[in-house]
């Protein structure tokens, strides 16, 4: 059978089995669409039904999370963990707490994570979990009680050699702390079952910075391959959480200027750039006060764009760092028309298929999330190594490893794109390089 028909058959089965799960189907289609040339060259993948197996999570866990608010009212949320693929190592991937969390979103994230983790060069399988809990507007005590209830069930399924979750949207240092404490209490074990931990209790230096820094390092590699640098580049950034904050910090260090930030209510445009002092305000606003980005516009007298994303602001480079499908086809056209030539995805799947099509067609230096934002999980992998050794490395050492890993990821994507006849196409390059390593490990390990 021709490669296209094989891929089409696999995709139709995924559609039938995962009816209505639009985000998951979107992520699967994007990867499968890159794999035609790979399965033509490797009929052994087809015989062993690697495609059919890789799109099906190894295990799916879904559970009730009851908790009590400060007034004594009882709430019930739905918790999940999708253990997607363990061919390369223990399941590894974040936990997302957001009201939109559902099977489709976590399966798209878990699926992407498999290939992302493969690209990091570190021994990690892929998984993702979370809950439809909304941390916004909750007191610290409410978040703690929720996290304790969530971990009470999750603790049955994870372990330092089994599955190691971390943060994602709505899960930062505070939530990781509450969950780590509860795991320790239940199991009476101080082990590295989560990454993104506090520095004094097993965390790694540079883990908070890693995703944002990594996304900028990836863009720097794409620029370098085109004999260019960040010096003087105007950059738009979306989001104002963990990834966006450290993207801005690294852009400033490298001589670029970040002119926007956003949250789910709107965006700010600061033509002079979010400098170190203004960024410190954002960290306090978002990580401590848990306020809205509009307060930045009020404080510094810059434009607040209610309900608007940053993509109509003229820029050289764009760093989507908020959420999935935040750049649609029209946004991509606007970015390109305004002279944007670099897009590095700090978020997971922030570009719709129509946007990706634009970037690829117009030869934008477009780093897809599974490559560009892999720095976060890569440093999580380094945190696991440090936990196993019971040692901590300096920030310089971790940052150097992060830079080396991002350069290696860029090289793998670049080389795979060349090898399979689509030079410069980082989407195909990332999908192919990420896939081949997992597929070979699955072949080696037999029919499991
Ligand atoms: P945070 O929770 O720290 O911040 C998320 C930011 O995105 C907030 O500004 C939030 O605004 C905004 N946002 C969330 N949902 C929406 C939405 N539906 N529409 C508009 N804005 C939204 O999360 P992170 O910074 O950790 O994660 C951001 C992205 O990066 C996600 O796609 C995540 O999967 C990805 N990522 C994160 C990694 C990590 O290590 N943390 C690693 C790799 C990828 P508001 O506060 O209003 O909700
Ligand atoms: O999407 C991601 O890669 C993350 N949220 C980080 C996962 C991790 O295990 O550090």
Image (cartoon, grey):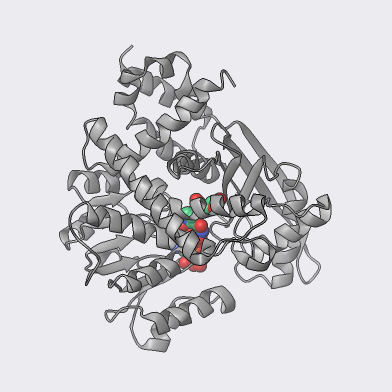
Q: Is residue 344 left or right of residue 209?
A: left
Q: Considering only vertical position in the picture, is 366 above or below 309? A: above
Where's residue 7, x and y in %?
37, 23
Q: Quick one: 76 or 153, which is closer to the camera?
A: 153
Residue at image point 66% right, 70% down: 138
Q: Quick one: 322 or 214, which is closer to the camera?
A: 214
Q: Quadrant of residue 11?
A: top left
Q: Quick one: 158 or 444, which is closer to the camera?
A: 444
- Which image quadrant: the N terminus? top left
- Which image quadrant: the C terminus? top right
Q: Is residue 373 left or right of residue 143?
A: left
Report whether residue 368 is seen: no
Q: Is residue 342 left or right of residue 374?
A: left
Report whether residue 355 is seen: yes
Q: Considering only vertical position in the picture, is 58 above or below 313? A: above
Q: Is residue 324 left or right of residue 158?
A: left
Residue at image point 30% right, 74% down: 259
Where's residue 182, x and y in %?
77, 58
Where's residue 269, x and y in %?
31, 76
Q: Quadrant of residue 357?
A: top left
Where's residue 200, x and y in %?
67, 68
């Amino acid at each position: 059978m021709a490669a296209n028909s094989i891929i089409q058959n696999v995709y139709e089965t995924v559609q039938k089995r995962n009816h209505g799960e639009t985000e998951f189907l979107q992520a699967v289609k994007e990867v499968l669409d890159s794999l035609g040339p790979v399965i033509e060259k490797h009929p052994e993948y087809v015989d062993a039904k690697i495609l059919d197996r890789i799109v099906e999570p190894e295990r799916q866990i879904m559970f009730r999370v009851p908790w009590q608010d400060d007034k004594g009212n009882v709430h019930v949320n739905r918790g999940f963990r999708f253990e997607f693929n363990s061919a390369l190592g223990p399941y590894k991937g974040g936990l997302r707490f957001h009201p939109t969390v559902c099977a489709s979103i976590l399966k798209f994230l878990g699926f992407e994570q498999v290939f992302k983790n493969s690209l990091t060069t570190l021994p990690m399988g892929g998984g993702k979990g979370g809950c439809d809990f909304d941390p916004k507007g909750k007191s610290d005590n409410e978040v703690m009680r929720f996290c304790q209830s969530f971990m009470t069930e999750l603790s049955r399924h994870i372990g330092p050699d089994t599955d190691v979750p971390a943060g994602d949207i709505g899960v930062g240092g505070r939530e990781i702390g509450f969950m780590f404490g509860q795991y320790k209490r239940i199991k009476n074990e101080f082990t590295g079952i989560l990454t993104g931990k506090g520095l004094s209790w097993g965390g790694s230096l540079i883990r908070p910075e890693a995703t944002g820094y990594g996304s900028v390092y990836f863009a720097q590699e794409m620029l370098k391959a085109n004999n260019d640098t960040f010096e003087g580049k105007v950059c738009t950034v979306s989001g104002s959480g963990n990834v966006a904050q450290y993207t801005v910090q690294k852009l400033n260090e490298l001589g670029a200027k970040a002119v926007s930030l956003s949250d789910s209510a709107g965006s700010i445009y600061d033509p002079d750039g979010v400098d170190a002092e203004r960024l410190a305000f954002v960290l306090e606003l978002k990580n401590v006060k848990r306020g809205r980005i509009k307060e930045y516009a009020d404080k510094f007298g810059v434009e607040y764009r209610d309900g608007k994303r940053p993509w109509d602001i003229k820029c050289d480079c764009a760093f989507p760092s908020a959420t999935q499908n935040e750049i649609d086809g029209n946004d991509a056209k606007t970015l390109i028309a305004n002279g944007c030539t670099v897009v590095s995805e700090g978020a997971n799947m922030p570009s719709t298929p129509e946007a990706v099509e634009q970037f690829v067609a117009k030869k934008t230096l477009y780093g897809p999330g599974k490559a560009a934002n892999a720095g976060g999980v890569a440093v999580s992998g380094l945190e696991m190594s440090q936990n196993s050794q019971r040692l901590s490395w300096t920030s310089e050492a971790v940052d150097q490893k992060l830079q080396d890993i991002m350069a290696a990821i860029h090289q793998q994507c670049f080389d795979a794109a060349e090898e399979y006849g689509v030079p410069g196409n980082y989407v195909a390059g990332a999908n192919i390089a990420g896939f081949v390593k997992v597929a070979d490990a699955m072949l080696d390990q037999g029919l499991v």
